[in-house]
Amino acid sequence: MIEKKIRIKNSAGLHTRPAATIVKMAAKYKCDFFISRNGMNINGKSIIGVMTLAAEEGSELVLTFEGDDEEVAAKEIVDFFERGFDEL
Amino acid sequence: MKSFQEIYRKSENKITGIAAAPGIIIGEAYLFTKEKLEISKADINDINKAIEDLHEALEKSKKELNKIFTIAREKMDDVRAAIFEAQLMILDDPILIGTIISRLKEEKKQPEYIVDDEISKYQSRMILSHESYMKERALDIEDIKQRIIRNLQKKRWGSKIDHNVIVVSESLTPADTVLLSRNKVLAFVTDHGGITSHAAIISRSLNIPAVVGTHNATEQIKDGDKIIVDGFYGYTITNPTQAQIDFFTEKHNRLVELQKGLEELRDKPAVTKDGKEINIYANVDVTGEIDVVVASGAKGIGLYRSEQILNETGEFPTEEEQTLIYTKLSSRIYPNSVTIRVFDIGGDKFRFLDYQEPNPFLGLRGIRLLLENPTLFKTQLRAILKASVNRNIKIMLPMISTLDEVHASNKLLEECKHELKEKKVPFDDDIEIGIMVEVPSVAVMTKVFVEHIDFLSIGTNDLIQYLMAVDRGNDLVSDLYREFSPAVIRTLKHIIDDAKKAKKPVSICGEMAADTLAMPLLVGLGLENLSISSATIPYAKRIIRNFDYKKSKKLAEKCLKFTSQKEIEDEIQKFFTDNKIIRTRQII
């Protein structure tokens, strides 16, 4: 299992468009992918779930990946967070 | 042919409302209701059939949404259309659909009950959140939930609006109006709302006739009824007689003829008979509107209400998204200019805030909210600057009430310029910055404010409301909201004179300027710049080209001496009669 702590970098936060992109990325992989924040644990392959996460700029999230292809999945998705959803 | 009096006065099938957007439409009514669907919690026997039904409803919903998504991408930019893409993804959400199916197997209840219960769980989590945009998001989810349930119940909904209809509704939010205007809407009729409600403003900007404030149109009109909407007089006629149909068809035809004549005015300037030119600009609310503006012969955009982007997307756009929107705007309108009013949120504009203010109109709105949230404000300012390379963008600040707010805003603008210079991003360093005059404290101090800004724009809607202490949305006192009050006219005169003395451009952008009756008075008071909805521009031009500036000046001088609204209104009516100016609604 891979666990990564990340911080939201872009000013608009985790809004609808990046939420959709993340879910699309996660759908390509077999591994489980969860996002947790303030005790709430959300399945990262569920768009409606990710949309309930109100993650504004500066908030901290924990991403967990578990399964065969966890490394590749973690790399692509964590990178996307690090790049501030390509909105910086 | 029966006379007008006979058609209107004697008819018992008319519903009286407020004329909100001009035009005559004869068509089929579509009742747009948001009532809660009845949801059955009944037990089921055939689980496989239920699962099949669910998949069928999901497919049907996808089809409908795909259609809306396509229209949205055509009419709006990609950024705003993204919201529909997310809705489409929900219909394929493996976790959500998986849970619903396993609950179906376990609980053996109607699928509509489980869909409702499961999606509502997510919504209540969104509503609980303290993030401001989450409540809007919960509403978007409501939309998708209703769509699936409706399709499970095999009720048609989306398809009903595939053909041309007149939308009849209790009230319409700005989002409803934009959403519905994407479909083939011939006209709007609503129970609530006034001439300055957002549904009315958006109808005018999209050129869709509207009658609002009918009180009970939704009770008197049934789905599919044939109705006539007269957006000039504010009447709706239900199940019209043949005589009425003939009368309005004739009226409609004359209107088409008149509009052809108005089209000829497009490229002609708004000049009074004695040669004084008035600059007419357009107010812009909706993305799809720019084409209408270009076609209307406006000299540019005098007011771009940027908060409309929030209404359409339901969340704050990023700096890049905003830059894209403003750049498009700037190039589409070039070589003319566009005045972008920074987010005017609060009051009735947007339910964006979590906390309930006891007096929102006297609360944290406009520039006050932006200065409280400098990150948000600076994001917008940087986006505007980045889009300003064509040198045809101006910035306007809403709800200014003190000079300190002007200084604070200028300071933030300077900071943004500095940041861009550091990054070597090009922008217009001489970008003009102006303010809205809508709070009486600014009107009184016009002389002082003009020393610190480049231009002024009078927002009559709020100015009148604050000057007269009348909530224009409150039916009990809305009679006191009067455009032709002696206090209003004297205040306008004071602002215009002080701005002109300082040689600073002053314009008017409230709905008062859209009232063709007010035109001679405004011109007579010395106003040379008007910003109005593009649909009204040809009508305004027609009036202006029909009187002498000298005479309108005398009219204004007279009106400035009057002490009652009645005297002023009578004098204006007399001006129209004496100068043989006919208003459009009298022609047709």
Image (tube, coloured by chain):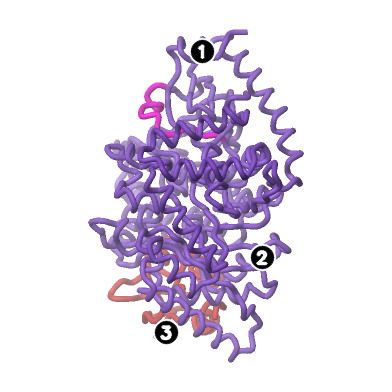
Chain colours: A red, B purple
Q: Residues within 10 Å of mark 2 (few under 14, many from 20)?
A: many
What percent of the width, then of the height, locates residue B273?
70, 41
Residue shown at the point (33%, 72%) measured from the top left = A41
What is the three-letter code of the residue carrying label 3?
A: Ile
Which subunit holds the residue at mark 1? Answer: B
Distance CA(mark 3)–CA(mark 1): 72 Å
Residue shown at the point (52%, 30%) measured from the top left = B574
The relative height of residue B244 versus residue B274 in the rendered view (above or below) is above
Q: Residues within 10 Å of mark 3 (few under 14, many from 20)?
A: some
The mark tally for this picture is 3
The relative height of residue B88 versus residue B183 in the rendered view (above or below) is below
The relative height of residue B165 versus residue B473 in the rendered view (above or below) is above
Residue position for label 2: B330
The relative height of residue A88 versus residue B397 in the rendered view (above or below) is below
Proximity of marks 3 and 2: CB atoms separated by less than 8 Å: no
Residue found farthest to the left: B358
Which subunit holds the residue at mark 3? Answer: A
* Along the line of sight, the residue nearer the viewer: B534 or B215: B534
Query: Which of pointers 1 and 2 lies earlier in the amino acid sequence?
Result: 1
Q: Which span is picked out in magenta?
A: B209-220
Which quarter of the image is occupied by the N terminus of chain B?
top right
What percent of the width, then of the height, locates residue B351?
36, 56
What is the three-letter code of the residue carrying label 2?
A: Ser
Residue position for label 1: B5
What is the three-letter code of the residue carrying label 1?
A: Gln
Helix, strand or loop under label 1:
helix
Q: Which labelled disc corresponds to residue A6?
A: 3
Proximity of marks 3 and 1: CB atoms separated by less than 8 Å: no
Helix, strand or loop under label 2:
helix
What percent of the width, then of the height, locates residue B379?
50, 75
